[in-house]
Image (spheres, grey):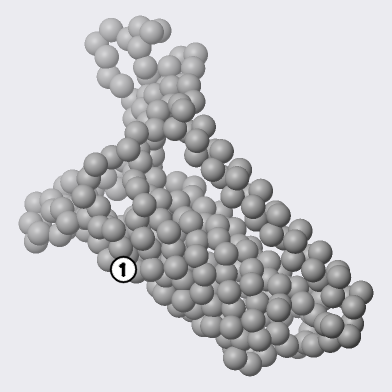
């Protein structure tokens, strides 16, 4: 059963993708117009400013640590490590690159990311199981962030296909955290998305590193594909047992030079 909240989230994702597609079509149209008007758009291999869009499917998880010095909580950490596993998230957004030279530049922007983790399927234990009773349960913890990256980009090579790497920091601003429950029956699955009301810290900092390929489509447009790793260095909640979120993904970016 898909809830109204889940429908809203799917609608928002579709709206974001439609907006990004419109941006690509718009800047591509400007590029084609510029090629037809060479006097107004002289050819240059170097663009001081580039705007871009990116999307990254991510594998997300967390590190669990004792926050109050009580070593007996290690049993709880072991239990959670046995119960919980990775989940699929994503990052999508708009970026601006300020190229200092052909091989080095600064990049910032604004992005939306879904991070978190999930439990493995847990069996219900009933004395007398019945077809009308659920058989298994899985919980998915989704952390929704606005991300503001600040990175240094390095490009090596002069041909169409070049090596690209970047290092930097991402400021993560928490919007909300939700819990998705999947209840499995013998003939169907019930799905519900509920907000949680824990006092999660609103800001985090994630060092990020990536390396990949930069493909020069023409004198204005670039396509980048780069495996990326991000790790939140600040705890997400002030509790006796706390968590640190991290993710790894394949970031795909399209850039247009001004």
Residue at image point 32% right, 65% down = 204
> Which residue is labeled 1 in the image?
233
Indicate whether 210 appears above or below 74: below
> Is residue 215 visible from the viewing direction of this image?
no
User: What x and y, as percent, mark residue 174?
Assistant: 35, 56
Indicate whether 66 appears above or below 49: above
User: What x and y, as percent, mark residue 31?
Assistant: 81, 71
Q: Residues within 10 Å of mark 1 (few under 14, many from 20)?
A: some
Of 227 and 204, nearer the camera is 204
Image-based side of 84 in relation to 22, left or right = left
> Is residue 4 visible from the viewing direction of this image?
yes
Give the quarter of the figure containing the C terminus.
bottom right
Residue at image point 50% right, 65% down = 110
User: Residue furthest toward the bottom?
Assistant: 101
Of 99 and 64, nearer the camera is 99
Quarter of image, res 170? bottom left
Indicate whether 234 appears above or below 131: below
What is the number of callouts on the image?
A: 1
Residue at image point 78% right, 87% down = 45
Image-based side of 220 in relation to 2, left or right = right
User: What x and y, as percent, mark residue 15?
Assistant: 60, 45
State the SS at label 1.
loop
User: Residue furthest toward the right?
Assistant: 36
User: What x and y, as percent, mark residue 21?
Assistant: 70, 54
Of 108 and 183, nearer the camera is 108
Residue at image point 49% right, 78% down = 151
């Amino acid at each position: 059963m898909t809830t109204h909240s889940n429908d809203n989230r799917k609608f928002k994702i579709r709206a974001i993708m439609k907006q990004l597609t419109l941006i690509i079509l718009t800047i591509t149209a400007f590029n084609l117009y510029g090629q037809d008007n060479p006097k107004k758009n002289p050819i240059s291999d170097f663009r001081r400013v580039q705007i871009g869009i990116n999307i990254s499917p991510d594998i997300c998880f967390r590190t669990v640590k004792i926050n109050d010095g009580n070593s007996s909580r290690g049993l709880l950490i072991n239990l959670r490590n046995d119960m919980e596993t990775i989940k699929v998230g994503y990052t999508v957004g708009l970026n601006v690159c300020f190229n200092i030279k052909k091989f080095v530049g600064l990049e910032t922007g604004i992005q939306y990311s879904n991070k978190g983790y999930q439990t493995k399927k847990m069996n219900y234990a009933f004395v007398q199981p019945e077809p009308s009773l659920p058989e298994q349960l899985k919980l998915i913890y989704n952390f929704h962030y606005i991300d503001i990256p600040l990175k240094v980009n390095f490009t090596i090579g002069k041909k169409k296909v070049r090596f690209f790497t970047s290092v930097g920091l991402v400021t993560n601003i928490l919007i909300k955290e939700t819990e998705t429950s999947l209840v499995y029956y013998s003939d169907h699955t019930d799905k519900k998305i509920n907000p949680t009301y824990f006092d999660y810290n609103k800001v985090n900092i994630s060092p990020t590193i990536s390396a990949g390929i930069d493909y020069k489509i023409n004198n204005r447009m670039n396509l980048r594909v780069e495996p990326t790793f991000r790790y939140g260095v600040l705890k997400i909640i002030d509790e006796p047992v706390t968590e640190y979120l991290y993710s790894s993904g394949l970031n795909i970016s399209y850039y247009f030079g001004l």
